[in-house]
């Protein structure tokens, strides 16, 4: 018993990240039975990104035809989401919530203008959701993206770091 306790303490010392509850990126680990437990404090509940037909989107398939700088509209959350494609092409660790910060109209990506445009009052945003023209002065909100086993998971909370600031 003493050895077991000492062993647990030693493991906590050797692997402090695990015992200190750093952010978990594994959203499939079950925290469903007791989500309020300390171990599940930073549980990331994600939903798989799907296409317009409801099919799960695999990252490898998406990137095979993705164009850097051209966001990709996907479903999965309660509202549409735009995945951000970086150079590579590479999937960004964040996606764009197309709800306009002005009065919540849904902005649309305009490939010919290379920007998001709000149909209500004309606000404009770049491919990362950064405001270019008002009336709003705020950027589009971001959503966390995690890739797991080639599945693209949308996690409905802003990323730890906003890459636009
Ligand atoms: S709701 Fe988008 S600019 Fe007003």
Image (cartoon, rainbow, N blue to C red):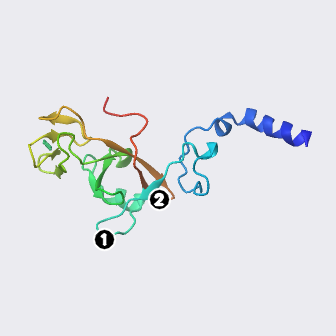
Q: Quadrant of residue 139?
A: top left
Q: Secondary structure at mark 2?
A: loop
- Residue 154 percent location from the top left of the image: 40, 53
Quadrant (top left/top right/bottom left/bottom right) for the C terminus? top left
The foreground one among 153 and 37 is 37
At a point 50% along the width and 48% down the height, the residue shown is: 44
Q: Quadrant of ligand 1?
A: top left
- Residue 60 percent location from the top left of the image: 41, 59
Relative to residue 21, is residue 25 drawn left or right?
Answer: left
- Residue 10 percent location from the top left of the image: 80, 35
Q: Secondary structure at mark 1?
A: loop
Quadrant (top left/top right/bottom left/bottom right) for the N terminus? top right
- Residue 26 percent location from the top left of the image: 55, 51
Q: Would you name the residue on which mark 1 appears?
A: 53
Q: Would you name the residue on which mark 2 appears?
A: 150
Q: Is residue 118 shown above or below 59?
A: above
């Amino acid at each position: 018993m003493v050895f077991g306790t000492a062993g647990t303490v030693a493991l906590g010392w050797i692997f402090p990240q695990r015992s200190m509850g750093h952010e978990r990126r594994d959203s499939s680990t079950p925290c469903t039975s007791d989500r309020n437990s300390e171990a599940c404090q930073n549980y990331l509940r994600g939903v798989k990104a799907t296409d317009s037909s409801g099919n799960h989107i695999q990252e490898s398939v998406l990137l095979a035809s993705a164009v850097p700088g051209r966001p990709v509209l996907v479903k999965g959350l309660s509202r549409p989401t735009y995945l951000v494609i970086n150079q590579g092409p590479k999937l960004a660790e964040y996606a764009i919530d197309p709800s306009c910060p002005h009065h919540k109209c849904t902005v649309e990506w305009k490939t010919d203008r290379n920007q998001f445009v709000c149909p209500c009052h004309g606000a404009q945003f770049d491919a990362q959701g950064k405001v270019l023209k008002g009336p709003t002065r705020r950027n589009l909100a971001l959503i966390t993206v995690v890739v797991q086993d080639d599945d693209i998971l949308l996690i409905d909370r802003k990323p730890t770091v906003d890459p636009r600031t």
